[in-house]
Amino acid sequence: MNRRTLLAVGAAGMVSTVAACTSSSPSSPAASSSLTFDKNAFTEKTTTVTTVAGDKEVVYRLYSKVAYVAKPVDVACQSLSVAVPVKIDGKEVDATNAPILFEIPVGGYMPAETPEDPFVQAGGMPGGGMPGGGMPGGAGMPSGAPDGGGPPGGNTGNGGALPTGMGSTGQNTHEAIAAGWVVVTVGARGRTNKAADGTFYGKAPAVIVDLKAAVRYIRSNKGVFPGDTDKIISDGTSAGGAVSTLLGASGDSDLYSKYLTEAGAADASDAIFGVAAYCPITDLENADTAYEFLYGSLPANGQSVDATVSAELSGAFAAYQDGLAVKGLDGKTLTAGGYRNYLLTQYLQPAATTYLAGLSSAERSEYLAANGFIKWSGGKATFTFADFLTHLGSRKKTVPAFDAFDLSAGENNLFGTATVDNRHFTGFSAAKASADLDADIPDLLKLMNPMHFLLERNEARAKNWFIRLGTSDTDTSLTVSSNVAAAASTLGDTVDSIMYWDAGHGANNDPEAFVAWGNKITGHA
Ligand code: DHB
C-alpha cells in the first residue's frame, strides 16, 4: 500500500493538536473533583469511522471531559474523554476486557484540551483527522521534500496558534474503536498555559505529571472503568510521541511523586502495557548533538548552518552514543561509528524497499528514473548514506536545533518556570550565553527523558513498543527514535520499529498495523 498521510503542520512546524488548549487563563477554578468514575454518566452516540478496511458504523458510549485529578488547575486540559464501543456495523461488542487506547493529543509540547467527543471535531465535523491520507504517493512526490514538512521555519519557535491536524490521533482512534477497543483521549497542560496572575502552569514536567495522573485515575477505577485497565496502550505523535514514550518508560517511578500528590492524582500504579510513538521528539538534552551528527552537512532554509557550531555539537555525539551501550535491533552494539550504516541497513533501505515494492511497475520505473541513486535489484533497494542525505537536500532546523542560543525554540519554552518563560537546558547553549544552567535543570531533564528510565532498566516500564518515523522527517535526528527502539530492545522488550520512506513529520502510513500489533501483544481477538 502506498497510501500517504497528509498532515496539517502548524506555522511553527509542529504537529498540532485536536484543539489548541487555552494558552491563558485556566478554564476552571481549582474546584475539587471526585476520583471515582461514574459508569452511568454516558451518552450514546453513533459515528462512522474511516479505517483502512473501509468505513464502519460504531455505536459507542461517550463519557465526556472527566477530570482525572482531584485538584485540577485547568480541567479543560486535566480531563479525559472515553468512547466505549457497543455496536460495530450492527454487531454488538463487549469491550469489558478490551485494550485501552490512551490517546495523547499533545503537539508541540503545547496545552492539549480534552475533546468533548474524540469522534466529533469542534464545529460538528466528524473527527479523526485524515484517515487514509489524502496525498498520492509515488513518483509524483518531489524527491527529497518531506511530505508533511510545512513551511521552512528555522527553529520550532514559541507558542502561536496551531491549526487542526492530528498526527496519529485520528487514524489510530478510528482503527482502534472499529476493532472494539476502548478509546480514551487525554488532555494535558502544556508550555504556554498561563494563569490570570501571569504565572505559567504547564511548563515541564506538567505534561507527564498529567498523563501519569490520568493513568492512575483509570487504574484506581479498575472494575468500573471500561476495558482492561492492565492493557493500557499510549499513543502520540511528535511531542505526543515523546510523552507517550516517556509515560511508558517511566512507569511507577517515584521521581514524580511530589508532583502527583500536588496535582491530586489517585493513588495507583501509573505503569502501562504498551507504547506507540510516531516521530517522538525526545531525548531533548542530546538532540542538538544528534541533529548535527546526522544533518550537519545540510542547509536549513536555503542557507548553510554555522559550521563551527555544528562541528562542536556533532563532535560531542560519539561520547553520548557510545556511552549508551545499547544494542541495535540487529543485536549489535550501536556505536556512533556504526550508526549511519545501521540506519541504512536497519531502516532506510528496508523503508525504500517497502515503498518501491508497493508501487506499480510503471510508477516504480518512474520513481527510480527520478532517483538514480537507488539501486533496485532482486526486489531490494540499496543506496549509500551520503546519497540519502543528498536526497534529503535540507534540514528543517538551524543550529542548535533545540536549545536555541536566542531561547526561541519551543523546547526553551518547555523548560521555563512559573515565572521565566524560556530557559536554556544544555550546558553548551548556556555557556554560549555565558551563563550556567539553572540548578534545577538536571533533575527536570530526567523527568522528561525516557532514555533515562530505559537506561536504568526501570522494571515497571512498558514492555511493548511500536515506533514509526518518516525518513524525511528532520524535526529531530533519526537517531532519536532508533535509540529508543534500541534501548527497549536491549532490555528484551518487544519492539516493532520501522520508518516510512520519503514521509515527513507526523506521518502514520499503517494505522492498521498499529491495531494488529496491539491485538497481538494484548491477546485481544
Ligand atoms: C514538535 C515538533 C518539533 O519540531 C519540536 O521540536 C517539538 C514538537 C511537534 O510537532 O509536536
Image: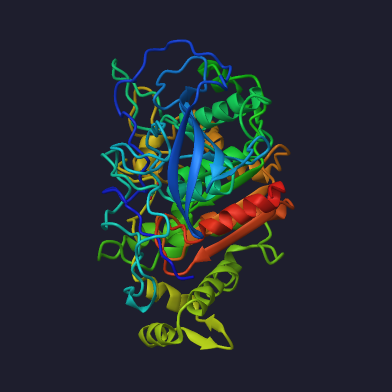
Above or below 303: residue 466: above
Residue drawn at (43%, 47%) of the image: 48
How far from the left and from the top, in percent, is residue 464? 67, 49
Q: Is residue 433 left or right of residue 79?
A: left
Question: Total number of numbered labels?
Answer: 0
How far from the left and from the top, in percent, is residue 17? 37, 42
**Res 435 visible:** no
Who is closer to the viewer here, 76 or 318? 76
Q: Is residue 202 left or right of residue 459?
A: left
Above or below 398: residue 191: above
How is the model colour-coded? rainbow
How far from the left and from the top, in percent, is residue 520? 69, 53
**Res 403 visible:** yes
Q: Farthest residue in the top direction?
A: 32
Above or below 211: residue 309: below
Quadrant of residue 233 within the rendered picture: top right
Residue drawn at (42%, 85%) of the image: 368
How far from the left and from the top, in percent, is residue 159? 29, 38
Q: Is residue 312 left or right of residue 348?
A: left
Who is closer to the viewer here, 137 or 351? 137
Who is closer to the viewer here, 43 or 140? 43
Residue drawn at (61%, 41%) of the image: 93
